[in-house]
Amino acid sequence: MFQKILIANRGEIAVRIIRACREMGILSVAVYSEADREALHTQLADEAVCIGPAQTAESYLNMERILSAAIATKAQAIHPGFGFLSENEHFADMCVKSGIAFVGPSGELIGKMGNKSQARATMMEAGIPVVPGTKEPVYEAEQGLAIADEMGYPVMIKASSGGGGKGMRIASSHEEFENHFHLAQQESVNAFGDNTMYIEKYIEKPRHIEIQILADKFGNTLWLGERDCSIQRRHQKVMEESPCAVIDDNLRQRMGETAVQAAKAVHYENAGTIEFLLDKNKNFYFMEMNTRIQVEHPVTEMVTGIDLVKEQIRIAAGESLKIGQEEIRLKGHAIECRINAEDPEKNFMPCPGIIEDLHFPGGNGVRIESALYNGYTIPPYYDSMVAKVIVHGEDRIDAIRKMRSALGEVVVDGITTNLDFQYDILNHPTFLSGDIDTHFIPDYFEKK
């Protein structure tokens, strides 16, 4: 097992990993930008190293500085968390070449599954159901238009290197395709430096379902239930729950086994997520694979009792999984609400600032993931998510009631947050019925 791990991230996920390291008897090294000098993760880690100015390109995305910090502190492994360099194949390769373990899959696997069009082609070859669409990359609008006309509208235009909702547009007709293609492609170039696109048939009002997997170096692969991530705004997840309200044991088993089949097709290793679209007829289609820990991993931990971050570290250290598929049981229902420093009344404008007063709830089945504290200044340079509230109840209704109670106790004074927006979702009759899809927020909360 590792004696020391560097966490190449910030915020609540850095704090989450540091705590897992403590519990495993592993020393931790935090890295931070000049804007994060007083951040909680720098105070909780055993060591902290400044890696540059606030701009991410000069700090959290600077591979050389992060690796230098790891070498200088004699860290044996780097955990990338999510975002930043977590799905960067070159960084994973650089870690290995520097004699440092990367807590995640190999760079080759990250590259293979991170390119969405390549991942689609790989899954098609493995017999995994995918959304009908292009197998080869598309670079020109005229080429994409011909494909879309033949496929039939609506279609989804997607960036091959996309993520976080960037580089995606829905074209509902021949007339609007070209403009949407150029917008999506330009967004992809700006965000990922890649103009590679692909086209797929748009599944109207699907659920976004993901299956958590764990795979070790010895060919053992497990699936740990599903998460329903359908509550989204502009392809960004807002709230997640496990299990899904409309998936029965038979469908769950089929989706889980398909996820394992997909992971084994690429000889996957470490924690990962196979993401599916589930249509109104309960047909499911592979969408993409995330080769890292997910923001919403706590809901899976709550219903399975398995610490995914610790499992990641054990796998990276060369240990085998100690549990079998038959030992995994889903118990109860878990919900996660993402608390963001943003103003829903002003088109969700980010609202950084100083935390003047802070209170988080506790109690049976309530979990908080956050890096906030009284007096902390939220910098304006990074993602607006500042906390996650996770609850676990006996069933879905119990979990919803528990989440309402928990959110009612949260106090984050000094900034504007989306707390009331989350509370409105929890009280909406359609959400309560469980009859939700990825259009829930656009249909009920966005002005037409």
Image: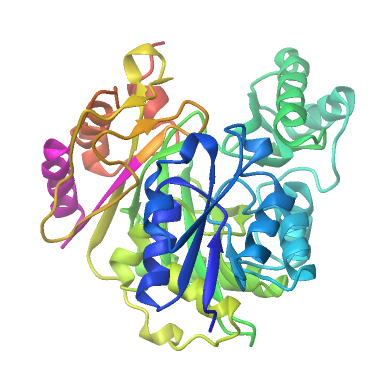
Q: Please state the horizontal and vertical placement of residue 128, each as a whole percent of the image.
A: 67, 63
Quarter of the figure with the C terminus: top left
**Residue 233 seen in this snapshot:** yes
| Magenta-colored stretch includes residue 397 | yes
Q: Residue at x 60, y 84 (%)?
A: 318
Q: Residue at x 73, y 56 (%)?
A: 91
**Picture quarter containing residue 408?**
top left
Q: Which of 156/83 is in front? A: 83
Q: Please state the horizontal and vertical placement of residue 316, each as a whole percent of the image.
A: 59, 76
Q: Which of 169/238 is in front? A: 238
Q: How is the image coloured?
A: rainbow
Q: Looking at the image, is 25 positioned above or below residue 240? A: below
69 with respect to 150 (left or right): left
**Residue 307 seen in this snapshot:** no
Q: Looking at the image, is 8 positioned above or below residue 328? A: above
Q: Please state the horizontal and vertical placement of residue 363, each as a whole percent of the image.
A: 10, 57
148 with respect to 387 (left or right): right
103 with respect to 47 (left or right): right
User: Total label count?
Assistant: 0
Q: Which of 325/83 is in front? A: 83
Q: Please state the horizontal and vertical placement of residue 118, each as a whole percent of the image.
A: 79, 53
Q: Which residues are magenta?
A: 387-410
